[in-house]
Amino acid sequence: WEGDVLVVQTDHLKAGWIRRNGLPLSDKAGMEDRFIRHGDLMTHISMVYDPFYTSEPVVKTNGFRLGLANRLDPYPCESVTEVVRAKGAVPSHLPGTNKAIEEYAAKYNMPVAAAAGGADTALPEFAAKLKTMPVPAKAK
């Protein structure tokens, strides 16, 4: 506890995704959750740190209201269609072999560094660097 805030730190996460359809997550990642109660409201703050895939923590928040019988009802979940793969198949790319980032950059006429993202791409200085970066050619 930090004052009235419950703090939960988790390490040794399995490699996967921060969201099922989003950013990859390495086995070097860690997570910190904070639970803050304000009367019948609770705020949940989740911060994921991954030195391999992110240059800054990915921060998400959720709000909950105390419902009937003192239970916290979360936001409604949505169903998704799972991707069926052959038994034992693990989609992966060895380092430096994933050409998808070049295809994406070419499709949208942007440098590969801009397509890769990261904290520095949000800074004004990055806009000046964009003018000097090459754009990959579109596939025929």
Image (cartoon, rainbow, N blue to C red):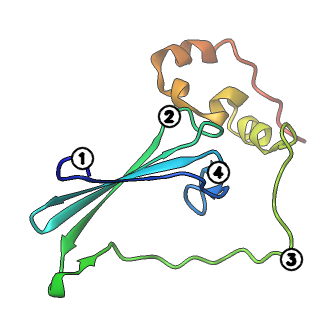
Q: Which residue is mark 3?
A: 86
Image x and y of residue 125, in percent: 51, 13
Per the model, the C-alpha gap separating discs 1 and 2 is 23 Å
Q: Amino acid at mark 2?
A: Glu
Which dot marks residue 24? 4
Nearer to the camera, 68 or 116: 68
Which residue lies under the disc numbered 1? 2
Q: Earlier in the sequence, mark 4 or mark 2?
A: 4
128 left or right of 98 in image:
left
Q: Residues within 10 Å of mark 1 (few under 14, many from 20)?
A: few
Horizontally, is 128 left or right of 27 in the view? left
The disc, 2 or 3, on the residue closer to the chain's N-terminal end is 2
Would you place residue 139 above or below residue 12 in this image? above
Q: Position of residue 77 (x, y in %)?
A: 42, 76
Residue placed at 68% from the left, 30% from the top?
110
Q: Residue 132, labelled with which disc? A: none
Task: Pinpoint residue 50: horizontal percent, then vertical percent.
Answer: 58, 42
Task: Point out the frontmost of discs 1 and 3.
Answer: 1
The residue type indicated by label 4 comes to: Pro
Dot 4, crowdedness within 10 Å: few (<14), some or many (≥20)? some
Dot 3 alpha-carbon crowd within 10 angstroms: few under 14, some 14 to 19, many 20 or more: few
> Which sits in the foreground, 20 or 40?
40
Q: Earlier in the sequence, mark 1 or mark 4?
A: 1
Q: CA distance from mark 1 to mark 4?
A: 30 Å
Secondary element type, mark 3: loop
Q: Which mark is residue 56?
A: 2
**Image quadrant in which you'd find residue 53:** top right
Figure check: 32 above or below 40 = above
Q: Of the residues under marks 4 and 3, which one precedes in the sequence?
A: 4
